[in-house]
Amino acid sequence: MIRFFLINLLFLSSSLAFSQSGPQKVFTQKMEVPASAELGTQVLRMSESFLGTPYVAGTLEGNPTEKLVCKFDGLDCTTLVESVITLAIAKKEGLSFDGYRSELTKLRYRDGEINGYPSRLHYVLDWLYENEKRGRLEDITARIGGVPFRKEINFMTSHANLYPAMAESEVWERVKEHENQINEREYNYIPKSGVHKAETLLRDGDIVAFTSSIAGLDCNHMGIISKVGSRAYLIHASTTGKKVLISDVPLAEYVASVPKHTGMIVARLIDQKAQ
């Protein structure tokens, strides 16, 4: 009888795994990553679980209509960061796969609602602002050595030819409106020269975005911090390495090695369950 019960249990478990979609199966596997008391440490552990995952550019682009993209088998820098944050929250808060998708929507879209291409938080500055507003993270740049970041943000509307969805005038106008809102706010960044000093103040799981020398663009790239002693290393979906990896040099040296990076912005997640 016991053997019969165990066989049926294994059959049901296998049937459940078989019935799950690809992303749902991976989500279930990621929920087996050991739990951590600190949300930042949980983010780091989730980041480490993606090491070696192929880099795929533009993972959110190319859909005829805007919809939630949820995939784990190929990531760019943005979808890596969004995925590991949301997986860490799901682990800490005991969310189901549907709960994960709901939280990912809140993280990625303005007011947590998918309402066409402009509703996605395309600019890192906008992404940080909106998620800080809802209490999910804190921009800590100013208190770890940041100085005012003054730049006119207009890359998307100035290069609409790079974004097929921008061909529609209504979409262009809505994106322009969001750019204007970004330009009305105040931001800080840590210049390249200050990154080494700031490393000691970073923690595991902090989110870093690298400000850009490209006209009209706020940030080139983003990733997750892993601390080794007083130095910080970057886990990121690398365009040169073609996969998710951890930098082989500390953060200051990494930033110095990329000419188009002018500095960095740092955010730290807030554990809403602990409040």
Image (spheres, grey):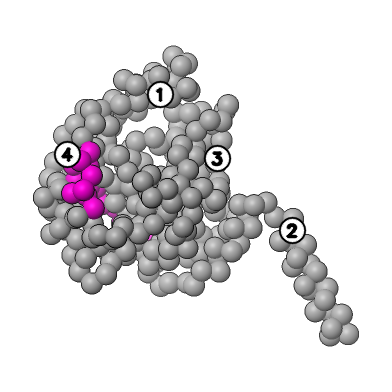
- Disc 1 secondary structure class: helix
Identify the mark nearer the N-term, 2 or 1: 2
Residue under pointer 2: 18
Give the residue type that dot 1 points to. Answer: Leu
> Residue reaching furthest top?
169
Closest to the camera, between mark 4 and mark 2, is 2
Instruction: Using the numbered discs, state the Cα–Cα distance from disc 3 to disc 4 in whole angstroms.
Output: 31 Å
Where residue 112 sits: x, y (%)? 48, 41
Give the residue type that dot 2 points to. Answer: Phe
**Quarter of the C terminus within the rendering:** bottom left
Identify the mark nearer the N-term, 3 or 1: 3
Residue under pointer 1: 162
Q: Are marks 1 and 4 in contact (CB under 8 Å)?
A: no
Q: Is residue 10 above or below residue 217?
A: below
Residue under pointer 3: 68
Residue drawn at (35%, 25%), measured in percent from left and top? Answer: 156
Where residue 211 sits: x, y (%)? 24, 41
Instruction: Using the numbered discs, state the Cα–Cα distance from disc 2 to disc 1 in whole angstroms.
Output: 39 Å
Residue under pointer 4: 149
Instruction: Using the numbered discs, state the Cα–Cα distance from disc 1 to disc 4 in whole angstroms.
Output: 25 Å
- Disc 4 secondary structure class: strand
Q: What numbered label is drawn on residue 180?
A: none
Where residue 5 sits: x, y (%)? 83, 79
> Residue reaching furthest front?
241
Identify the mark nearer the N-term, 4 or 2: 2
Identify the mark nearer the N-term, 3 or 4: 3
Residue drawn at (53%, 30%), measured in percent from left and top? Answer: 62
Identify the mark nearer the N-term, 1 or 4: 4
Q: Could you classify mark 3 by the number of other residues whose Cα lies within 10 Å: few (under 14), some (14-19), or many (20 or more)?
A: some
